[in-house]
Image: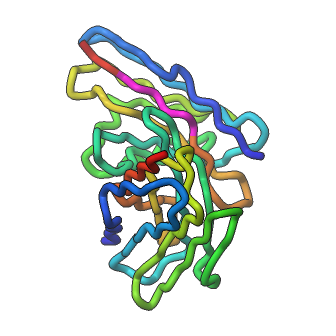
């Protein structure tokens, strides 16, 4: 079955530093990957859609200069939270859509805590 | 704008009971609907995917139905087990030129042994 690996699962960083989160599709090619953020007791909110080889499309209200997304290959997308602040603390989840297929496979998520 | 509502927000049942989780949506022009399970601090596991042309999907003890005209979907869990305890999310893809999923807030299920 389709597997998406997300790392790290948990990270604590100091305010002002940058954190990179990786999302890899292990056994399929993903033309499109998605990045979500989830606050406690809230639904997943889409942050951005990344397509391999092109710039990511950000949802309204998401700062593209703060949340840098790179989708350099069909199996890897990265999200970098730059100059992190405590309000960026959240659960970040990526998902991938199989090229030419349906359904979404999600990573295991990354718990980011900014102190 | 599509809005997805899941009721109840939390549900506690004794082991062995059958139960139904509800999902309603405001725009019936959907392409497909997907039910997910999320364990605490974890990612999402896809349970069932229903295409807009389908009315239900079954997998083991799970059955999901879709009624586009009324804007509703239900997830039926038979003979619940403690291992079913998790948050269940429904999500819709409206097919509006992207692959964006719109999620509900989920129903947190606790199955008491």
Q: Specify whether residue A109 is painted magenta.
A: yes
Q: Residue at x 49, y 77 (%)?
A: B30
Residue B23, horizontal then vertical, whole percent: 40, 70
On the rendered structure, is A31 left or right of A35? right
For the C terminus of chain A, the image quarter is: top left
On the rendered structure, is A82 left or right of A76? left
Residue B82, horizontal then vertical, whole percent: 53, 46
On the rendered structure, is A62 left or right of B101? left
Q: Which residues are magenta?
A: A107-112
Please tell me which residue lies in front, B45 or A47: B45
Residue B97, horizontal then vertical, whole percent: 51, 68
Residue A10 seen anywhere in this rendered image of the structure:
yes
Q: State whether residue B95 is above or below residue A5.
A: below
On the rendered structure, is B1 left or right of A105? left
Q: Residue at x 70, y 62 (%)?
A: B60
Q: State whether residue A24 is above or below residue A10.
A: below
Residue A33 seen anywhere in this rendered image of the structure:
no
Please tell me which residue lies in front, B45 or A16: B45
Q: Quadrant of residue A106?
A: top right
Q: Residue at x 55, y 34 (%)?
A: A108
Q: Residue at x 32, y 66 (%)?
A: B7
Q: Please state the total of marks drawn on the protein image.
A: 0
Q: Specify whether residue B62 is painted magenta.
A: no
């Amino acid at each position: 079955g389709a597997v998406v690996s997300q790392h790290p699962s948990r990270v604590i960083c100091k305010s002002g530093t940058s954190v990179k989160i990786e999302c890899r599709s292990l056994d399929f090619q993903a033309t499109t990957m998605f990045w979500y953020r989830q606050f406690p007791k809230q639904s997943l909110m889409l942050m951005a859609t990344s397509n391999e080889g092109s710039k990511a499309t950000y949802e309204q209200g998401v700062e593209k200069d703060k949340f840098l997304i790179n989708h350099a290959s069909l199996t890897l997308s990265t999200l970098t939270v730059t100059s992190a602040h405590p309000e960026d603390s959240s659960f970040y989840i990526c998902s991938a859509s199989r090229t030419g297929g349906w359904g979404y496979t999600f990573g295991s998520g990354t718990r980011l805590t900014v102190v | 704008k599509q809005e997805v509502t899941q009721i109840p927000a939390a549900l506690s049942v004794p082991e062995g009971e059958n139960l139904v989780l509800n999902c309603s949506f405001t725009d019936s022009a959907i392409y497909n609907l997907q039910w997910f399970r999320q364990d605490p601090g974890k990612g999402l596991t896809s349970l069932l995917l229903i295409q807009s042309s389908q009315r239900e999907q079954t997998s083991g003890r799970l059955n999901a139905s879709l009624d586009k005209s009324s804007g509703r979907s239900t997830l039926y869990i038979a003979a619940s087990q403690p291992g079913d305890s998790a948050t269940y999310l429904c999500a819709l893809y409206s097919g509006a030129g992207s692959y964006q999923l719109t999620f509900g807030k989920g129903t947190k299920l606790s199955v008491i042994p």
